[in-house]
Image: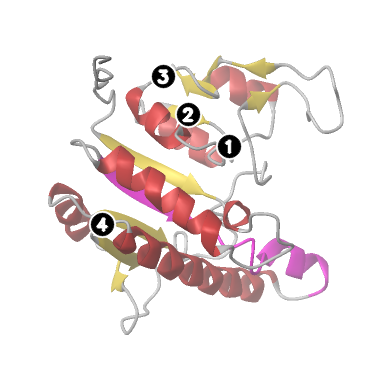
């Protein structure tokens, strides 16, 4: 009989996973694909099986995007608030799938929706994480003009490139890149404000394709997938 595979300890003790709304669509044009949501939930459950505390920020672009509405003439702030409501719908779908996968989960919102989720209070969120619950964060920051999504809102972003890989077949994917290099190059792979905050707090960012089964666990273990953004 073969020996059981050696368990690899996670590199990170606490992880913030960013899911764009488009990641939940699967092959659909809009909305939520339950199979995709269950697949992501199962990966999160596996990653959490050790001692890893996991929070998830979820976008709403699969349902409504404020920027798109603004380009069509809608007031930008109104469009952004509608997008925040879309993130709550995605958060509830993800919570259901996570709890079916055996993960106790709390949805916390930056805007008041007391009948369906908790208000975001930092100390309460930290307590949930310490108790082993997955915390799903919706409604962004609660303010218009701030997006939860990166500029690269493709359904399968497998890293940071020096050009758009869909337009340039010679685009090169970085395995590692520094915060300052990413910002100076204006690669538009991530929101510049988010990168600056991560740099100020020395938080590494891993950009990877979460549609590949097992990639969330690999990222938590610190395996070399996608692009690592750091000092």
Q: Give the range drawn in magenta.
A: 53-73
Q: Of tags 1 and 4, which is closer to the observer?
A: 4
Q: Residue at x 36, y 64 (%)?
A: 95
Label 1 crowd (10 A; few <14 / some 14-19 / many >=20)? some
Helix, strand or loop at disc 4?
loop
Between 13 and 25, which is closer to the camera in this rendering?
Answer: 25
Disc 4 and disc 2 in contact, CB within 8 angstroms: no
Residues under labels 1 and 3: Cα distance? 25 Å
Q: Mark 3 points at which residue?
A: 223
Q: Of tags 3 and 2, which is closer to the observer?
A: 3
Image quarter where the C terminus lies is top left
Residues under labels 4 and 2: Cα distance? 26 Å
First reached walking from the N terminus: tag 4 or tag 2: 4
Residue 199 visible at all: no
Q: Mark 2 points at which residue?
A: 206
Helix, strand or loop at disc 2?
strand
Q: Name the residue under label 4.
A: 102
Magenta stretch encompasses residue 71: yes
Q: Quadrant of residue 27?
A: bottom right
| Vertical comparison of 163 with 189: above or below | above
Q: Residue at x 46, y 70 (%)?
A: 88
Residues under labels 3 and 2: Cα distance? 10 Å
Helix, strand or loop at disc 3?
loop
Label 3 crowd (10 A; few <14 / some 14-19 / many >=20)? few
Q: Mark 1 points at which residue?
A: 192
């Amino acid at each position: 009989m073969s020996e059981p595979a050696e368990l690899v300890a996670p590199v990170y003790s606490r992880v913030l996973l960013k899911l764009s709304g488009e990641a939940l669509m699967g092959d659909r044009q809009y909305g939520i694909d339950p199979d995709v949501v269950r697949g992501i939930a199962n990966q999160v459950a596996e990653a959490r099986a050790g001692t890893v505390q996991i929070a998830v920020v979820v976008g709403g672009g699969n349902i409504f995007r404020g920027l798109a509405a603004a380009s069509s003439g809608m007031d930008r702030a109104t469009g952004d608030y509608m997008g925040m409501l879309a993130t709550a719908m995605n958060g509830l779908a993800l919570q259901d799938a996570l709890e079916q996968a055996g993960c106790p989960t709390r949805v916390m919102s930056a805007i008041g929706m007391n009948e369906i989720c908790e208000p975001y209070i930092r100390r309460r969120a930290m307590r949930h994480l310490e108790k082993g619950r997955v915390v799903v964060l919706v409604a962004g920051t609660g303010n218009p003009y701030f997006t939860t999504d990166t500029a690269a809102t493709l359904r399968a972003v497998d890293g940071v490139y020096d050009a758009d890989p869909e337009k340039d077949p010679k685009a090169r994917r970085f395995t590692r890149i520094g915060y300052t290099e990413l910002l100076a190059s204006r690669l538009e792979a991530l929101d510049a404000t988010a990168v600056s905050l991560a740099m100020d707090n020395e938080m590494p960012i891993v950009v990877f394709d979460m549609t590949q089964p097992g990639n969330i666990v690999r990222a938590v273990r610190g395996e070399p997938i996608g692009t690592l953004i750091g000092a």
